[in-house]
Amino acid sequence: MPSEYRLILKHADQPGYTNDLDCYLRHGGYEVLRKALSLPPRILSDGRKVSAQEQIRDEVMLSGLRGRGGAGFSCGLKWSFVDRKSGKPVYLICNADESEPGTFKDKQIIYKDPHQLLEGTILSCFANDVHLAYIYIRGEFVQGAKILNRALAEARAKEFLGKNILGSGYDLEIFVHRGAGAYICGEETGLIESLEGKRAYPRIKPPYFPAVLGLYLCPTIVNNVETLCAVKHIVAMSGAEYAKLGTPNNTGTRIVSISGHIKKPGYYEVEVGKVTLGELILDPAFGGGLREDRQLKAVIPGGSSAKVFKAGEKFKLKRRGPDGQMSTVEVGVLDLPYDFDSVQQAGSMSGSGAIIVMDDTADLTEALENIAEFYAHESCGQCTPCREGSLWMAKALHRLNHGQGRKQDADYLLHIAKHIQGRTICAFGEACAWPVLSFVSKFKDEFQAKGAADEARRSRTLTAGAGPGPDLRIAASPEV
Amino acid sequence: MTTASATESKPASPAIEKVTLKVDGREVGVPKLTPDWQGKLVPTTMLQACQIAGVEVPHYCYHPKLPVAGNCRMCLVEFGLPAMGPDRKPILNEDGTPKIIRQTLPYEPGTPRGAIACATPISPGMEIYPNSPATKQMREAVLESLLINHPLDCPICDQAGECKLQEYSVEYGQSQSRFVEEKVHKPKCVDLGPRIVLDDERCILCTRCIRFSKEIVGDDALGIASRGSHNVLTHYPGKPFDNNYTLNTVDICPVGALTSKDFRFQMRVWFLKETKSVCTSCSAGCNIVIGSREGRIYRYTPRDNDAVNACWMCDYGRLNYKWIGREDRLKHVLRRTAGGKSERTTWTTALKEIGAKLKNTAANATAIVASARQTNEELYLLARLGKRLNALTDSVPRRGEPDKLLLQADRNPNSTGARLTGFLQAAAGSNLRKIAEGIQEGRIKTLIVVGEDVTKHGIDASLFSRLDLLVVSDILPNAAAAFAHYVLPGCAHTEKRGTFTNGQGRVQKFMKAVEGPEDARPEWEFLCDLVFETTGLDGLASIEGLFNQMAKETPAFSGLTWAGLGDAGVPANSLNTA
């Protein structure tokens, strides 16, 4: 029977568990930090000393932890890229700009267990010789920022933060920085620009890789909230133990946000790859199935920017058998293991772990318009393809949904989207192109039918001498 | 330039490390490092490698003198990298050549991946495909995107004719757009500052102007507001875009978004004749191009010269051209009759008469005041004349507040030339009082004034009655002219050829763009005649000959030739001759 495996959210929803320091300490809080700070150097057989910091970094590498923000990049590898010889300070930024539509997992941690995030952050900072860190939290999380600031004050008062933490000689300060409400601030270099007080225009890479030229052009680590929390558990249980959770190359646990047309929308922490997409949607332990016994039509597996899956779709996945041999297996959408690699092999991504379920009542042209308008609104506008293309797609979809569609609009949309992906400064290009590419190509008949129906109706009303059509203009100015 | 002077010491150039790669199938060796916009050596980019290979990569936001932004995406090029084995050694094809992997999207292995040539460093063995079908398709797509919300108002746009959007659309674009939606509408005719008008609909948001103002001028005045397709260029709220370099943003704006209030709607650029010249508003000597048509000057634009002004010039100098076309210019050669009235005469008569008088002037009885706005050649001729007459010579200092970029405190374009030619023996202005005293005391009986109103500089008009001969040459009306025995109308630098020596001692030549009004003649021409009439020295009737003669006789200019100056000028030999 599939079930939740609560590691990060172990205490969060327990009755009586509060987000203050006392409660956290009662549940063994900051013990991992205490141990890590007093960890003696390990002496290797060749006499080389491995410092406590290096030991933690090794454990994180060993754990196979992959970033929980969206890209799923190896955390240990990311840390290994940090330029430690530059002579410049190393900064760490906790990316709490959780903005991907459908995602609401970091919020749970921040609101319900902020000290766990702090402990994970402090440990990660210690491991990387960071003395100044920031938590960049999305502007809409007003309460979250307050909670974190209170938690920071509590931690400072108890010497978990500040000068000479717990008598170890290690100094660290953490500040909370609130964004002003822009999705692009979740892109790590956009975040860094924003943190520097500038417009959140993502930086070009090369040369501005954060590990080398990040915040204030110093080496910088940007990690997601959930990733930093996982670090705490890796240090607590060892990398090897953590790696036993989940599946090979997809280790640990993951908090999955499930929303849409299901009975039990919510967040569920699971071992990565131990449950399938179908179980997450249908099993009573998770989504609990579709409402009123409707049929599944589509599912977005990793936040609104991930490519959509069509109900009944089949994928060919490469699997390594127990004998080490690679084989190909055919898997349907519902049987797809929910891990980084399987979802990627199926042509999409598990992204931020947000599953959006749509049943047969969903109008996918309207759903896509909703998504496209979001991305048109959130495009920073720095580089040409995304700036122009995101609004172009939104306008076309708006037209299609308001009686002015054309049969060729499906191909028209594909054309626009293809010219955005892979040609932009940051991954927003993919984020806005992929929904359009996947929705339109997988449900092309729906898009064409709508366009054809509009054309037919227009030709009828034209012959009947009807008046002008509805106002097609999309809201022309952005919100201020 | 082989005419390197003694003072110009060249740093020992280290061996330049080269990288071999292929551009468009052709092998090229390019330096591993190239100076960036600040002159710092950084890894050479694909765009620079293509330039070395002679292949154009179209671009909007990239500008060699600005930090790289990488936002327009126009320079996306398809490229390949040598395949590496697990041992980090290149994998070879069957024929022994290195195996090249054309880069594709990581999530879509069939689709070529472009890299922005402006920011992507080269690596050994790399292959760049600036003309491949995939590259062309990427450019078409970027151009289509740039044009969907563009107003396409070329017929009324000032940039038409020198617009990169137009040029690239023709060269790299498609003839049709698929766009059927309504365009985004943005502010038109935005008053960005006292000299600049912005059309936000034409703006392609390349941020060149923002980077220029912030990084080059140090005035973080411009920025982008709003988001996505609604992005607009704007100035800081309540603070107009007003520094001394704003008009450079019009030059670097690749489209018609930023226009000069001075130039807009005045003339279609393709009608403008372009003449290489030098700005005369201060001693910086910024290289410029004069845009003129049918004898009228319409604009100055900066001309590239890394030794002087890079590709910038200040607004003060750029707009300082309108006096040239003034109606009240001195246009006639005038002679004062015995009765005290002025009458028109001819150059021949006037110069013969002045020459005859000068020939008979006693030594030490002459003073010459000439402007440091006159050319090297003119000052050289005046220096010769002065030597012959043993005259007291001087010039008028002209100073103002300098800025950190180009504008110099010395507002004369040729103070250095006045010294190097020997016309000025002491600091400018130090002899003016002596001249006034000499006239007052009756020792000085002849005064020749070229290009200055001496009545404003310590030689009062009341003294002129004591002179036997007052010759005044100028371009604009001059209070001394009313008292002059002879008035000789001169030419602005746009109306003649010559050279100036800028504050750093660089000898730069300028060419003639327009004709002077009516009788006005280049000063060097009539000074040659005058020197001939006075001294009998001949053979200086062409500017080339005159320059070369001057160079022969002037230690600071020795070895220089008119032809050798080229477009960028040459440093004078030494500044220590003063």
Image: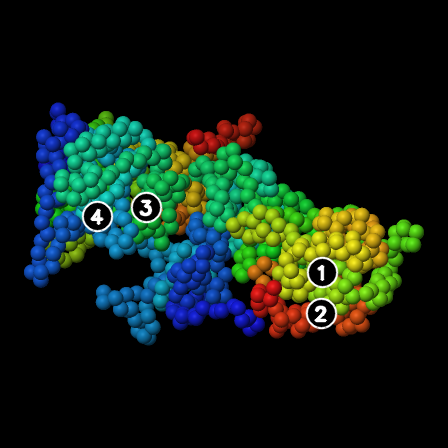
Mark 1 lies on a secondary structure that is: strand
Residue on which disc 4 sits: A129
The label shown at residue A215 is 3
Local crowd size for mark 4, using a 10 Å CA cut-off: few (<14), some (14–19), many (≥20): some
Q: Tell me, yes or no, if residue B36 can be seen here.
A: yes
Instruction: Work out how far the residue at label 3 is from the one at label 1, CA to CA, in angstroms.
Output: 62 Å
Residue on which disc 2 sits: B546
Query: Which marked residue is nearer to the observer: mark 1 or mark 2?
Result: 1
Query: Which marked residue is nearer to the observer: mark 2 or mark 3?
Result: 2
Please tell me which residue is depicted at 10% across the width and 45% down the height of the picture: A38
Instruction: Work out how far the residue at label 4 is from the one at label 3, CA to CA, in angstroms.
Output: 15 Å
Q: Are marks 1 and 2 in contact (CB under 8 Å)?
A: no
Residue on which disc 1 sits: B393
Name the kind of residue labelled 3 in the image: Leu
The label shown at residue B187 is none
Which badge, 4 or 3, comes first in the chain's sequence? 4
Against B324, residue A97 (above or below) is above
Mark 2 lies on a secondary structure that is: helix
Instruction: Work out how far the residue at label 4 is from the one at label 2, CA to CA, in angstroms.
Output: 71 Å
Name the kind of residue labelled 1 in the image: Thr
